[in-house]
Amino acid sequence: MPKRLIFKKFARRLKKAYYRILGFLGSVIFALGRILRLIPRIRPYSTDEVRRILIIRMDRIGDVVLSTPTFKAVRQHFREAKIYILVRSYTKDLVIGNPDINKIIIFEDKMPFLKEIINKIREIRKENIDFAIVLHPNFWPNLLAFASGAKYRLGYDAAGSGFFLTKKVKDSRPTNPRHEVEVTLDVVRTLGIDTTDKKLYIPISEEGERFADFFLRDNNCESVDNLIAIHPGGYYHYTHWSVKGFAQVSDYLIEHFAAKVVIVGSPLEQVLANEVVSFMKNSPIIAIGTTLTQLISLLKRCKLFIGNSSGPMHIASASGVPVVAIFGNIHPADHYRHWGTWGEANIVVSKELNCSDCQPADCLRLDCLRLITPQEVIKAAETLLNKIQINKN
């Protein structure tokens, strides 16, 4: 085993030990703080005392999209409460216009992290929050829940930070893999909240709709065209399928389905998109660097989405667009059973290689992705396109 991987493995073990020590010390300090009345004692939960609720979801695009059923469940249970949500600035477009949210608090990504933590503590405390619900198993969201001054604090006992909470949920994802929608709903199920409605929700803005209309018109696209979105990127490099594979699939769809392929992605994925184009025989449409609200409206107009595990994949699925999702690794934290598309009109293309101790970030070969062929992706795309009976060339 290369020294780099040995070091990473040791670092992971050290991190787990650190969290255990942090959790123990934090619990001891909080117990003493309650005895000395420096920290308020944990009070029996009472729904009648909940007037202002803060939901914290400070991670990425897909996480926020897959949490929308939880937002609705909280709203339906606490009909008279004012519901706040804390999200990062680059995901705010996913909750602007959501009818289940009364006020959005934005964590500015461009600010120095610790400075923004302090800013948010000051801002949140002004709202007199009664109940903080943390949907992201992480230290900092749990700390913010405590710092909010909320008398009730619910979330996952993770990263050695469970002592910040008044009601803890065990993080059983490594031993009980399940979809993130269910993981998120598990938090509020501890309150006896009805979680039967699991439909995702994506708001649409006027600005996004105008952009999509003008963008498609400028690229000679009409509503009857077979517009297919291709997303070759994703947050982690180890989720990226081959650029040559995306190129071959795109050419096939253009030549056999008269498709108009649009390559989507963030500004950081421009180089990746250029690589795909360099291997293509036909010319696609490029939509790299759109805002999130523009991307939502653009994907909504597509007949099919093909891409890696990513935020745009979840946006497409939530918008009712059929999705071919390409997944490689089998690590519980990244597996398609946890992060796959949520809906019926989707197909996951994946290889079950059963690698022992799968750590995708350490893998030098990524055979799980390399062994996926363009033919397999094309077959999945054809299956979905035939279901909606689009016209072939």
Image: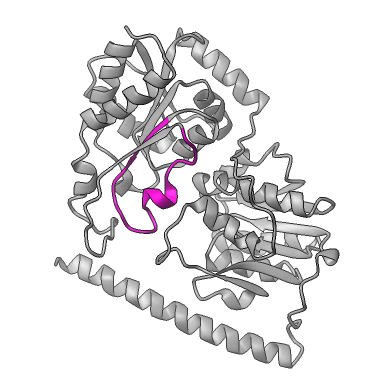
Quarter of the picture holding the C terminus: top left
Q: Is residue 227 depicted above or below 58 in this figure? A: above
Q: Is residue 349 depicted above or below 190 in this figure? A: above
Q: Nearer the viewer, residue 23 or 351?
A: 351
Q: Toward which corner of the image does residue 279 lie, by quadrant?
A: top left
Q: Toward which corner of the image does residue 294 lie, by quadrant?
A: top right
Q: Is residue 322 one of those drawn in magenta?
A: no
Q: Residue at x 75, y 47 (%)?
A: 103
* Residue 105 at least partly seen: no
Horizontal and vertical percent position of residue 2: 15, 65
Horizontal side of residue 315 vs 44, given as left or right: left
Q: Nearer the viewer, residue 329 or 20?
A: 329
Q: Residue at x 55, y 59 (%)?
A: 136
Horizontal side of residue 373 vs 141, given as left or right: left
Q: Residue at x 52, y 49 (%)?
A: 63
Quarter of the picture holding the N terminus: bottom left
Q: Residue at x 64, y 45 (%)?
A: 197
Q: How many marks?
A: 0
- As drawn, which residue projects farthest toward the left? 1
Horizontal and vertical percent position of residue 268: 40, 38
Horizontal and vertical percent position of residue 213: 57, 15
Q: Is residue 318 depicted above or below 392 in this figure? A: below
* Residue 220 at least partly seen: yes
Q: Nearer the viewer, residue 198 or 39?
A: 198
Horizontal and vertical percent position of residue 237: 31, 47
Magenta stretch in the rendered image:
323-344
Q: Is residue 210 depicted above or below 291 in this figure? A: above
Horizontal side of residue 35 vs 373, given as left or right: right
Horizontal side of residue 187 vs 124, given as left or right: left
Q: Is residue 330 one of those drawn in magenta?
A: yes
